[in-house]
Image: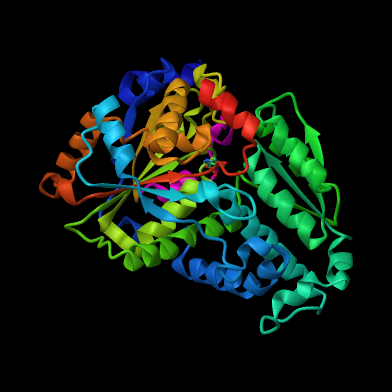
């Protein structure tokens, strides 16, 4: 371990647990009431901008992805109650969940089957819009369905989009960019599953494989892209565009809760559990949620014990100045969507005043939770997504948090939402393997 970091192990109990690879919970002492109003790096107007852009693209998306017909070109997932899973968690894990347990099925998001269908697709669309507008080929008031015409395919084919990915980001960027007509190069880390590489190649995407971890794939992608003036790099370590694409989930969630008659306010708090890799997806969603629900919403990130980079970054305050390797943690996890060793350069700082805390979970439990959800609710989600239950199976920490926030008297009114971040694109044979693990 780096000498300079040893003091953190002595002073922060959650960091001490983390380096011993123990499951733990870190409560964020910097969270403050109304914290969302203090965030300076991004602003609510950017959520509106992203949301409006997605509306402009809806007619195009509906045209090129028939599965979006039903929603008029809006990429959104179902929110549903999972009472049988609540029973499973209470019985198998003594979770003692008292309120309502729901799941947000980003695992079934159309087009790319993971939460990346929010941020990743958004950033590609934004880039395409900018290029087309600069070339004088598109105006905001146009019907964007024209982007499906061969003329635009040809136009975009002069340009390259590149991204580094552990898998799902590559899928979303690759599928969307290829559809628009871009040349696409996805730099895949060693953790990426074979089927994801195969699927991308089948859609005409160039996949470059690395024996090294995620940061290496990102670095190489960035370097390649910078050398080519016609190339655009989707930078997961720094991208505000990805973040804003994810943040639109907040207002969408509000609309779904309203439709289902579910009240979220001070007396009916909402607890949201978001699996975290580099932080962009859970950070963006949490930011969007806090802007809509304020203090009624409590957002938790969840990470694998072997890739707890955001916990290290936020608990030490070093953010991207620390990696799991600095603490002799190997970064190896079956939760490929979360296999990230160094957190985003900006997300931890943005969510510092609003995030409730971070829970970690062992890989073996992810499979057990997967089977539990499949058996009790007939819902398949991938291992990474099962991390969304990490906090829910730590009743002592939940109770301590409720006490600290003065919420014990409303415990029974809580709406718990496990954000299932991926799954529908996992091939049948891989599902069967997972279920046997
Ligand atoms: C990418 C991903 C996450 C986390 O997103 P980050 O932006 O990397 O934090 C969670 N779950 C799944 C399935 C993912 O693919």
**Relative depth, front residue between 209 and 321:** 209
Location of residue 382 in the rendering, given as x and y in whole percent from the top left corner: 53, 36
The colour scheme applied to this rendered structure is rainbow
Q: Is residue 159 above or below residue 425?
A: below
Residue 350 among those drawn in magenta: yes
Which residue: 60% across, 71% down? 53
Residue 12 visible (yes or no): no
Q: Residue furthest left?
A: 409
For the point 62% across and 46% down, the residue is: 236
Give the quadrant of residue 192. top right
Q: Would residue 239 appear left or right of 387 to someone viewing this image?
A: right
Find the magenta span and give its range. Answer: 336-353
Give the number of marks. 0
Percent x, y for residue 5?
45, 22
Residue 277 vertical placement versus 324 (above, below): below
Which residue, as the protein is rendered here, is positioned at the far bottom? 141
Point out the quarter of the image occupied by ligand 1.
top right
Q: Residue at x 77, y 76 (%)?
A: 146
């Amino acid at each position: 371990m780096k000498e300079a970091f040893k003091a953190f192990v002595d002073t922060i109990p959650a960091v001490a647990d983390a380096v011993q690879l123990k499951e733990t919970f870190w409560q964020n002492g910097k969270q403050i009431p109304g914290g969302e109003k203090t965030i300076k790096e991004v602003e609510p107007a950017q959520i509106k901008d992203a949301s409006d852009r997605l509306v402009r693209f809806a007619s195009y998306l509906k045209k090129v992805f028939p599965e979006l017909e039903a929603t008029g070109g809006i990429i959104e997932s179902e929110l549903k109650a999972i009472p049988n899973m609540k029973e499973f968690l209470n019985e198998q894990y003594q979770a003692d969940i008292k309120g309502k347990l729901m799941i947000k099925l980003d695992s079934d998001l159309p087009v790319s089957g993971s939460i990346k269908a929010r941020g990743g697709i958004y950033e590609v669309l934004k880039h395409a819009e900018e290029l087309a507008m600069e070339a004088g080929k598109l105006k905001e008031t146009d019907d964007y369905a024209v982007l499906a015409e061969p003329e635009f395919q040809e136009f975009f084919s002069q340009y390259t989009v590149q991204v580094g990915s552990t898998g799902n980001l590559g899928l979303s960027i690759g599928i969307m960019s290829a559809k628009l007509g871009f040349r696409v190069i996805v730099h895949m880390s060693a953790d990426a599953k074979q089927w994801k590489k195969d699927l991308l190649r089948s859609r005409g995407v160039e996949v470059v494989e690395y024996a090294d971890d995620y940061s290496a794939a990102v670095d190489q992608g960035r370097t390649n892209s910078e050398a080519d003036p016609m190339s655009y790099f989707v930078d997961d370590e720094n991208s505000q565009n990805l973040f804003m694409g994810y943040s639109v989930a907040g207002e969408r969630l509000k609309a779904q809760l309203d439709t289902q008659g579910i009240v979220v306010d001070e007396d009916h708090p909402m607890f949201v559990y978001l699996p975290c890799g580099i932080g962009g997806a859970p950070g963006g969603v949490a930011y969007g949620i806090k802007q809509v629900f304020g203090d009624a919403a409590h957002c938790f990130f969840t990470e694998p014990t072997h890739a707890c980079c955001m916990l290290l970054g936020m608990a030490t305050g070093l953010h991207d100045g620390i990696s799991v390797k600095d603490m002799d943690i190997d970064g190896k996890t079956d939760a490929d969507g979360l296999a990230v060793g160094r957190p985003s350069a900006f997300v931890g700082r943005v969510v510092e005043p609003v995030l409730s805390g971070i829970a970690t979970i062992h890989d073996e439990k992810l499979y057990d939770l997967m089977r539990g959800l499949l058996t009790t609710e007939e819902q398949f989600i991938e291992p990474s997504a099962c991390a969304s239950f990490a906090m829910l199976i730590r009743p002592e920490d939940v109770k301590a948090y409720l006490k600290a926030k003065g919420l014990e008297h409303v415990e029974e009114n809580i709406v718990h939402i496990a954000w299932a971040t991926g799954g529908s694109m996992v091939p049948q044979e891989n599902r069967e393997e997972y279920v046997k693990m």
